[in-house]
Image (cartoon, helix red, strand yellow):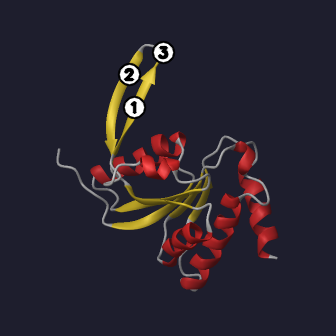
Amino acid sequence: MKSKKPETLSVLTIGLGYLQAALTNQFIDTLIQSGLYKVGIFSGQPTGDSKVNALPPDFVYPVVSFTNKGIQDIRLTESLMGACPINTPRGQGYFVAQAEDSLDAILVGLGEGNIVEGNVGMEVLDQTLYRHFTANDGKSSPILFNTDNLSGNGQVMQHLMVEAAK
């Protein structure tokens, strides 16, 4: 089967961890390969640039599925269109600028201990939401989804974003 690359950006992720790559990127990649979706992902990594620098230049990377009996599957994931570290003002500005266009989703995967007030990922989420809604006059309503395994994660994020908006 011939590979299809995303045509435009429509999903932002905050966090570039293994769960985000294995689930979100692979899910969107499958939709793209099936012809059901034509947009890609841009990711921001809050803990520095090592994960961003480890990505290949074309952002195509393998996702390995395994069990206790060994490797079950290896698939190339092509849905990622770009990534940047967001632990510096320059990186934050670059990431937040990606929110000016219409978006389908903003996904947050920071790890359980990082969905707290003052965390750089939460601050960037606040800036991203503000930039997105002001740039689009409220005409685009992306889904905001927390991909971490955190009890009550939606309520925690809602509280943090409402407090930040005050």
The amino acid at mark 3 is Asn
Quarter of the image containing the C terminus? bottom right
Alpha-carbon span between mark 3 and mark 1: 13 Å
Q: Secondary structure at mark 2?
A: strand
Q: How far from the left and from the top, in percent, is residue 110? A: 64, 49
Callout 3–callout 2 Cβ contact below 8 Å: no
- Quick one: SS at disc 1? strand
- Kindly identify the amino acid type of the residue bearing the numbered disc 1: Val
Image coords of residue 134 (percent x, y): 60, 84
68 left or right of 74?
right
Cα distance between the residues tagged 3 and 2: 8 Å
Name the mark on residue 71: 2
Residue with the mark numbered 1: 64
Q: Residues within 10 Å of mark 1 (few under 14, many from 20)?
A: few
**CB under 8 Å between discs 1 and 2:** yes
- Residue 35: where, in percent of width, then height? 27, 55
Relative to 39, say whether 4 is above or below: above
Disc 3 designates what residue? 68
Q: Which quadrant of the figure contains the N terminus?
A: top left
In this view, the residue farthest toward the left is 2
Task: Judge the density around disc 2: few (<14), some (14-19), many (≥20) Cα neighbours within 10 Å.
Answer: few
Which of 120 and 142 lies nearest the eye of the viewer?
Answer: 120
The alpha-carbon separation of the residues under discs 1 and 2 comes to 7 Å
Taking depth in this image into account, of 2 and 42 the one nearest to the observer is 42
Instruction: Label 3, secondary structure: give it.
Output: loop
Residue at the spot 68% in from the left edge and 69% down from the top edge: 126
Q: Earlier in the sequence, mark 1 or mark 2?
A: 1
Residue under the point 17% across and 48% down = 2
Picture coordinates of residue 50 (x, y %)? 51, 48
Left or right: 74 with respect to 129? left
Q: Between residues 54 and 134, which one lies in front from this camera angle? A: 54
